[in-house]
Image (tube, helix red, strand yellow):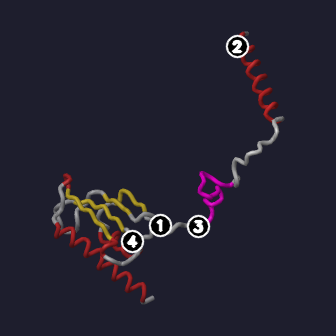
């Protein structure tokens, strides 16, 4: 019984305060110049749906390096892929004719068909690193295949 009294009293006070707030005169101070402005950046909620991309934030990936990396490392099972940021991570797999299992993480960080655009991290089973020669051979194979894909694409 006391709980319902408290609830009724709280509801009555809330209603009275809401109604009294409606009768206040308008403020002389302008609080917000632009009602669409969020966080002082000049952006509105509708900018999410627009095509206003900041080139400093947009990440572009070279499609030839991306496809070449997938082709060269096709013997490895893919675990995670993010084509928008240019990253894919594979699980362990044994190359054709090999006896050692490897896994790779590939990062294509630039739209240019350039060696600086490609970062490959290889690892042997047990977390051991691969030799620098093996790492370089895989990177060279990916870049060579990317150049072949680029040439065949320009011939179309």
* Label disc, if present, on residue 110 of the rendered structure: 4
* Label disc, if present, on residue 52 of the rendered structure: 3
Mark 1 or 4, closer to the camera: 1
Q: Residue at x 64, y 57 (%)?
A: 44
Measure the alpha-carbon separation of dots 1 and 2.
58 Å
* Label disc, if present, on residue 3 of the rendered structure: 2
Residue 151 belongs to the span the image colors magenta: no
Q: Position of residue 1 (x, y in %)?
A: 73, 9
Measure the alpha-carbon separation of dots 4 and 3.
21 Å
Left or right: 17 with respect to 96?
right
- Kindly indicate the quadrant of the structure image that contains residue 63: bottom left
Left or right: 24 with respect to 143?
right
Residue 42 belongs to the span the image colors magenta: yes
Measure the alpha-carbon separation of dots 2 and 4.
65 Å
Decide: marks 1, 4 in contact (CB < 8 A)? no
Read off the residue under disc 1.
56
In terms of sequence position, does the residue under pointer 1 or pointer 2 come before the other? 2
Mark 2 or 3, closer to the camera: 3
Mark 4 or 3, closer to the camera: 3
Give 82 or 10, whichever is nearer the viewer: 10
Q: Is residue 3 above or below residue 37?
A: above
Q: Position of residue 93 (x, y in %)?
A: 25, 60
Decide: marks 4, 3 in contact (CB < 8 A)? no
Decide: marks 1, 2 in contact (CB < 8 A)? no
In terms of sequence position, does the residue under pointer 1 or pointer 4 come before the other? 1
Measure the alpha-carbon separation of dots 2 and 3.
55 Å
Secondary-structure class at tag 3: loop
The crowding category of the residue bearing disc 3, from other C-alpha atoms within 10 Å (few below 14, some 14 to 19, many at least 20), is few
Q: Quadrant of the C terminus?
A: bottom left
Q: Residue at x 35, y 69 (%)?
A: 70
Decide: marks 3, 1 in contact (CB < 8 A)? no
The crowding category of the residue bearing disc 4, from other C-alpha atoms within 10 Å (few below 14, some 14 to 19, many at least 20), is some
């Amino acid at each position: 019984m006391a709980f319902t009294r408290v609830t009724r009293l709280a509801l009555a006070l809330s209603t009275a305060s809401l109604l009294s707030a409606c009768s206040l005169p308008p403020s002389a101070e302008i609080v917000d110049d632009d009602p669409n402005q969020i966080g002082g950046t000049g952006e509105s909620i509708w900018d999410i749906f627009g095509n206003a991309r900041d080139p400093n934030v947009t990440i572009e990936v070279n499609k030839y390096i991306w496809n070449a990396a997938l082709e060269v490392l096709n013997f490895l099972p893919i675990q995670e892929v993010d084509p928008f940021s240019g990253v894919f991570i594979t699980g362990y797999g044994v190359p054709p004719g090999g006896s050692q299992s490897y896994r790779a993480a590939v990062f294509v960080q630039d739209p240019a068909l350039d060696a600086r655009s490609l970062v490959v991290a290889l690892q042997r089973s047990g977390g051991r690193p691969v030799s620098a020669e093996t790492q370089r051979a895989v990177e060279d194979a990916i870049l060579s295949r990317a150049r072949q894909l680029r040439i065949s694409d320009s011939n179309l």
